[in-house]
Amino acid sequence: MSRSDRDLFSPVTLAGHRLQNRIVMAPMTRNRAIDNLPNALMAEYYAQRASAGLIITEGVSPSSNGLGYPRIPGIFSAGELQAWKPITQAVHERGAKIFVQLMHTGRIGHPDNLPEGARVLAPSAITAAGEIYTDTAGLQPHPVPQEMRIEDIAHTREEFVAAAKNALEAGFDGIELHAANGYLLEQFIRPTSNQRNDRYGGAIENRARFVLEVAAATADAIGASRVGIRLSPYGVFNDMPMYEQMDADYDYLAEHLGQMGLAYMHIVDHASMGAPEVPQHIKQTMRERFKGTVILSGDYEAERAQADLDAGKCELIAVGRAFLANPDLPARWRMGAPLNSPDFDTFYTPGEKGYTDYPAYAGA
């Protein structure tokens, strides 16, 4: 394609969804959902950023067992479903499309953050290193998770399907499966967190089984064109260390996901946050295996975003922290305007400070 065909600011069609530009607001946990319910403050936050082509929400749990952090939203109850409707409406009124990211935290959780009766589940009873914040007792060590039985795996898969259906009823254009950053789907992929000896553990054909089942089941339920997936090869967040066969494992995932005709594959590179850099040949090989739309994310600014689009490395560019601090990011990028700096101290605190109070550019 020519440069004009891949212009960062021009409209593009993604799996039948017409986007107003190629800029994606990346999913970012913000912890503003009091009692795990979406609210008016969240509607304002997303509406402010609806000059993106596509918004991918913060991680939203498909299950009471997946609410591992304080104040993250769900989409498994009737009340949660209804509470998302004003948010999707506000985003659509301003021209953006919006996918909800389905994130089950798995072993990255704590009983103090979960509703009564919920459980910290994982592929294997292996504790993640480090601590997790709770509103009730501050930082606490990660607990030993319960190893999922076959019945738990089947039930959790159906929770993803139910959440995907809820998403469409709530007005979302689609879903993104969060198979990255050390959460449940990635916990099944990685041999360090998955040491099962049944059909869901061992070789990559088994470790990838749950992810592929969830992707296939949600695609069957709402249509493949409404399902994307996020992967983090070389990601080490949440005690996901590097291992020898990682390149081959992610090639396998990309190929088999590509056979499903999903809306996109979102490859995240967290090198700017201290993770190992994802080599370009890994991204390119995954792209070739997937044979569909690819979103790249990883500390992009406008010039590098356009260069990677021109080079055919991807179709869409996702931006996180810069969008967090600049609700009018596409306009600022187009004009070459200065950017607000993000306030790291308010990333995960309740309230509007550091959330909806970032100013738009006066010259926009």
Image (cartoon, helix red, strand yellow):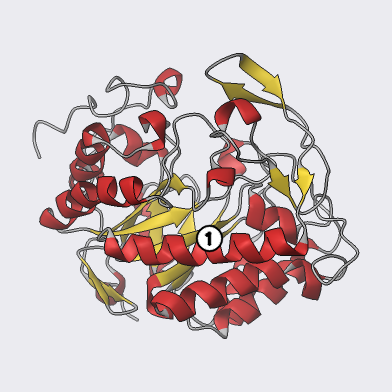
Q: Residues within 10 Å of mark 1 (few under 14, many from 20)?
A: many
Instruction: Pick whichever, 339 or 236, lies toward us.
Output: 236
Which of these two is toward me, 76 or 317? 76
Residue 336 appears in the figure: no
Where residue 337 sits in the image (x, y, percent)? 21, 38
Q: Judge left or right: residue 188 versus residue 5.
A: right
In depth, the one of 291 and 230 nearer the eye is 230
- Residue 113 on image: x %, y %: 56, 29
- Secondary structure at badge 1 equals helix
> As drawn, is 344 to the left or to the right of 16?
right
Q: Position of residue 111 (x, y in %)?
A: 64, 30
Give the tally of numbered discs. 1
Picture quarter containing residue 44? top left
Question: Which quadrant is the N terminus positioned in?
Answer: bottom left
Q: Is residue 175 visible?
A: yes
Residue found 41% across the figure and 21% down from its top: 349
Q: Which residue is the extreme one toward the right?
A: 197
Closer to the camera, 291 or 256?
256
State the residue position of label 1. 159
- Looking at this view, name the residue that lies furthest to the top: 137
Q: The C terminus lies in which quarter of the figure?
A: top left
236 sits to left or right of 312: right
Residue shown at the point (44%, 23%) measured from the top left: 344
Three-letter amino acid code at the position of disc 1 = Glu
Furthest residue toward left: 363
Q: Position of residue 55 (x, y in %)?
A: 31, 54
**Residue at x 22%, y 52% (from the top left corner):** 85
Identify the residue at the far bottom of this view.
259
* Image vertical order of residue 286 relative to residue 324, above or below: below
